[in-house]
């Protein structure tokens, strides 16, 4: 029996006050927790795509992936409000999160009034393809590709081509293994261990030390490269390329 994991962490804020010297930033120990002390951030060789962030909160399930997708569509000149794009998503609204036998590889599963949802790339891809089909005049010639499994260098390659990416990660970027909270078996016999909700971002750039993301509140996040790799791989390296 196959076993899939969905990772989640609750959102915490971390504000870094830094002193700059050219493209290198050193975070003073007295202004941050000890784990961040003396971190050197080199923002040289930065590549960044000009994508307008969108605030898609608070709707769920699938809110962050839908918002990231809408932001990428907007970059290509296809303007769509995240709440309207959501209408194309295959959603199962569940008050207990795991009742029924649907798979988060097929549907967006979650409580519309809560804080938890489960989903991976395939239902988001279906949402985008259905949107393309229904808006052929605006989306003619556009494609959506599942590039899950791509490593960081491959993701950077797309950024170098001015192609922003929808990527999966954890909410805080802390990839520590969380407690397993929910388990269910789909009608296909697959067992899922649910660890609350994933979080999606729009990847728009990188530099020598960081990966640059847009969160579902529309704000830009600079995440240390090693942290990004942890949060991305912990969500099974799920990624979508919208062209």
Image (spheres, rainbow, N blue to C red):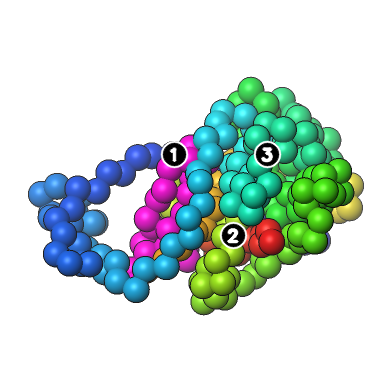
Q: CA–CA distance between discs 3 and 1?
A: 26 Å
Query: In which image quadrant can residue 211 be found?
Result: bottom left
SS for dot 3: loop
Q: Do the numbered discs 3 and 1 sit on residues whose CB atoms are within 8 Å? A: no
Measured from the top left, where is residue 118 in percent x and y? 67, 43
Give the crowd class for mark 3: few <14, some 14-19, many >=20 residues within 10 Å: some
Please state which of the two labelled residues, at mark 3 or mark 1, is closer to the viewer. Answer: 3
135 and 196: which is toward the camera: 135
**Which residue: 80% across, 39% down?**
88
Is residue 38 visible from the viewing direction of this image?
no
- Residue under label 3, please give it: 80
Q: Position of residue 182 (x, y in %)?
A: 66, 41
For label 2, the SS is strand
Which residue is located at x 10 percent, y 49 percent? 30
Secondary structure under badge 1? loop
The residue at the far left in this view is: 30
Question: For the magenta stretch, what is the residue range?
Answer: 208-231
**Foreground: disc 2 or disc 1:** 2
- Total count of labels: 3
Q: Which residue is mark 2?
A: 165
Residue 229 visible within the image? yes
Picture disc at residue 11: 1
Residues at marks 3 and 2, CA–CA distance in whole angstroms:
17 Å
């Amino acid at each position: 029996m196959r076993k899939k994991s969905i990772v989640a962490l609750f959102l915490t804020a971390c504000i870094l006050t830094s002193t700059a010297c050219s493209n290198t930033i050193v975070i003073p120990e007295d202004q941050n927790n000890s784990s961040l002390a003396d971190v050197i951030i080199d923002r040289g060789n930065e590549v960044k795509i000009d994508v307008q962030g969108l605030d898609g909160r608070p709707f769920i399930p699938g809110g962050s992936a839908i918002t990231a997708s809408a932001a990428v569509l907007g970059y290509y000149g296809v303007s769509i409000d995240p709440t309207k794009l959501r209408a194309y998503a295959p959603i199962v609204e569940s008050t207990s999160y795991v009742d029924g036998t649907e798979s988060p590889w097929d549907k967006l599963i979650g409580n519309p009034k809560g804080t938890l949802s489960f989903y991976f790339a395939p239902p988001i891809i279906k949402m985008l393809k259905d949107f393309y089909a229904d808006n052929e005049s605006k989306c003619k010639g556009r494609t959506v590709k599942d590039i899950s499994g791509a490593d960081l260098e491959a993701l950077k390659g797309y950024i170098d081509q001015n192609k922003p990416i929808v990527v999966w990660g954890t909410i805080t970027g802390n990839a520590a293994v969380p407690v397993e909270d929910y388990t269910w078996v789909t009608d296909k016999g697959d067992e899922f261990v649910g660890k609350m909700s994933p979080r999606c971002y729009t990847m728009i750039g990188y530099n020598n030390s960081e990966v640059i993301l847009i969160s579902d509140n529309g704000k830009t996040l600079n995440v240390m490269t090693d942290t990004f790799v942890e949060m991305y791989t912990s969500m099974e390296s799920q990624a979508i390329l919208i062209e």
